[in-house]
Amino acid sequence: KIKYICVQNFLFLKFRPDAVILTDRRFIFYRSLLFGRSNFSDYTWINLHDAKVSEGIFRATLTFHLTNGRFLIMKKMPKEPARKLYAIAQEMEERVAEMQRVRALEHRRAAAGGVVINGTAAAPAGDGSGINPAEKMKQLKDLMDSGLITPGEYEAKRQELLAKI
């Protein structure tokens, strides 16, 4: 879905202005070229590293810094629409950062599927492996303190260990 469109506004006549289009999944830079040609460059929000707007006396300049080190610059944008575009870009940037944080947390939780002791996976409590249940509880507490499991997951595993003693 299109969230916002910002079109260049020149003080003097220009037949085909450039534009920036923001959608819920992408941002698109439209540039008009000579002889009726045009160029669309679209990027997913995950490619955006930082968005900036700088205002002059009459117009604003929009700069999108991408994660690959490139910059996309759109000059001669009207000030108010450029501010709105910037606000939406900041919102999407925060949304992507939160999504990446949640994804990284899920990967860490998945990697912590088994408790590892001295490079070997520990067997479940009560299976005759000889591992002290108190040590297992300490390891679970360490996993919860480091954020790899939630307090609810910790409590469920702790109850499970207590039931097997």
Image (cartoon, grey):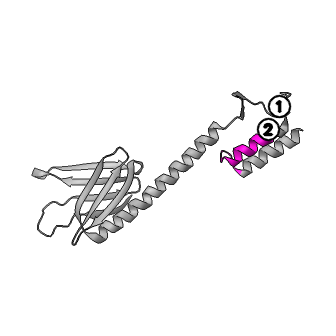
Indicate the quadrant containing the C terminus: top left, top right, bottom left or bottom right. Answer: top right
Q: Classify residue 79 as left or right of residue 134.
A: left
Q: Residue at x 79, y 33 (%)?
A: 124
Tell me the crowding category of disc 2: few under 14, some 14 to 19, or many 20 or more residues within 10 angstroms, Cα based: many
Outermost right residue = 165
Name the residue carrying label 2.
136
Figure check: 100 above or below 80: above
| Magenta stretch, main secondary structure class | helix
Q: CA distance from mark 1 to mark 2?
A: 8 Å
**Residue 6: percent from the left, percent from the top?**
28, 63
Figure check: 62 above or below 134: below
Could you say whether the residue bearing mark 1 is in a helix, strand or loop? loop
Q: Classify residue 152 as left or right of residue 92.
A: right
Indicate the quadrant containing the N terminus: top left, top right, bottom left or bottom right. Answer: bottom left
Name the residue type under label 2. Answer: Lys
Evaluate if marks 1 and 2 touch, with contact meaning CB atoms under 8 Å apart: yes
Total marks shown come to: 2
**Residue 148: percent from the left, percent from the top?**
66, 44
**Residue 45: percent from the left, percent from the top?**
40, 51
**Residue 19: percent from the left, percent from the top?**
25, 59
Name the residue carrying label 1.
131
Q: Residue at x 75, y 42 (%)?
A: 140
Q: Residue at x 29, y 60 (%)?
A: 62
Give the extent of the magenta segment. 135-150
Q: Nearer the viewer, residue 41 or 146?
A: 146
Res 112 quadrant in image? top right
